[in-house]
Image (cartoon, helix red, strand yellow):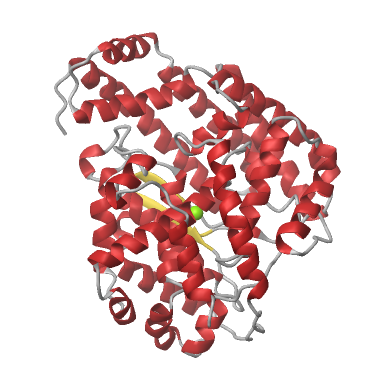
Amino acid sequence: MQIKNLQIKKLLEKYKEISLLGRVGALMGWDTEVNMPIKAASGRGATSALITSIIVDKWNDPDFKKTLETANKNKNLNSDEKSILRNLNRGASIYHKIPKELLVLESELTTKSFAAWNKARRENDFKSFAPYLEQLLELSRKIAKHLGYEKNAYDALLDLYEPGLTTEFCKSLFNNLVPELSKIAKNIKTTKKIKFKYPIERQKQDVKELISKFGYDFEAGRMDIAPHPFETTLGRFDVRITNRYQETSLEGLTGAMHEAGHAMYEQGVDTKFENTPLDNGVSLGIHESQSRFWENIVGRSMAFTKFIAPKIKVLKQKDLYQELNRVQPGLIRVDADEVTYNLHIALRFEIENDLINGNIKVSELTKIWNAKMKEYLGITPKTDSEGVLQDIHWSHNSFGYFPTYTLGNLYSAQWYFYMKKDIKNFESLVEKGNFEPMLAWLRKNIHQHGSVYWPSELVTKITGENLNPNYFLNYIKEKYIKD
Ligand code: MG
């Protein structure tokens, strides 16, 4: 990196502390989900809140703010310096605009809300979670107001997860996707589940070997068990993932591929960006495109089942393919197949937009959720636990997060289309278990850049066009519509 400007140098020194404190927070978060004894929860809440508050103070340090202001007036920065400044401004637009009390309140309220949601879901008791949801929505509306927006408060929240994403853009995407996907889903005959047993110890060994072959570096990460699989970055050379296993399911396999996809992105960022604002994946949408590429486009392909079936010896190749690709409208988002998955997201997007704008009340949520499930997927949840209470996101105050899942699915198909132009024998390579060319392509085009290019720039740089949902629709049609 070419950093000559003194202000940028100074900002980078100060930002390094923010970055390192963030790693401390991430390590505690990882420990909370993987190792922490249950009685430690409130103590851990206080520790995390302190780290958050120190980070907020660092962003608001008068000297840091002044230096940032001066740097913003400088018209002679080089491209590295401009990228750094842009990302610092993005961080500042959050930490400088939202009052510290609100950020601290958010960390307290989400800790309590998470516990309330967990209990409510377990006991199928939406009413007990409703008051928390009211408070979270109030908080999110306030946050949106502080962040600022032109047309819709929900835009401010969407932008937190995907720079530049708007309600209008999401609407046009879903208007395009929903009718097509619903039609395809309705025309697919669901196959019967094949019974099998896949011993957990074997699964752990198999997926470890598999993701190493993909390119996940176990010397710069580790894989543990947690109730919800996730990836977390504790440092440039400490990118961890978690997974979960069931003897009668393939979720250990698909989960490992998914999280390894996230992790390889982080492991592939150019080391020169370490502890700068450029050293992470650029957005949740681009991140999800990496996990979905390995989980779905590679991991649920015919060629891949030809490679993996003889290795894991749990199902015949044909049956394994069928099990990995069964299309069936279901109640639960995380269990959804490639065809119906985005319908779950469309429903959440519409509901969130209406909730944030006060067009629907929390007390009407069950009714509205169930009506939309019927409309989009043709089924109705019998309980709130399988309906409106199924996802963790709202308890984390993550309104605006869901649409990034759809963006990830769409981006992954667009990468795939262009990757195949460069890697002509894609399928035969996958069948042989040679994943190096794919990882190299992703490294070169996406991973190494970290947060240098924003999503819209990245997609035009790589593919010469904007995000285009037709790549995903064509991928789905080619795979699932048999003539
Ligand atoms: Mg993911």
The relative height of residue 186 versus residue 265 in the rendered view (above or below) is: below
Residue 214 in the image: above or below residue 316: above
Counting every numbered tag in the picture gives: 0
Locate residue 146: give its quadrant.
top right
Relative placement, left or right, of 109 versus 30 is right
Query: Which of 298 and 127 lies nearest the eye of the viewer?
Result: 298
Can residue 35 be seen from the camera position used here?
A: no
Residue 84 falls left or right of residue 301? left
Task: Give the position of the N terminus as an image quadrant.
Answer: top left
The quarter of the picture where residue 172 lies is top right
Viewer-side residue, 128 vs 48: 128
User: Residue 454: x percent and y percent?
Assistant: 36, 38
In the image, taking residue 116 as reference, residue 33 lies left or right, namely: left
Q: Position of residue 42 (x, y in %)?
A: 65, 36
Q: Position of residue 197 (x, y in %)?
A: 59, 84
The residue located at (24%, 20%) in the rendering is 8
Residue 309: x and y in percent read 44, 85
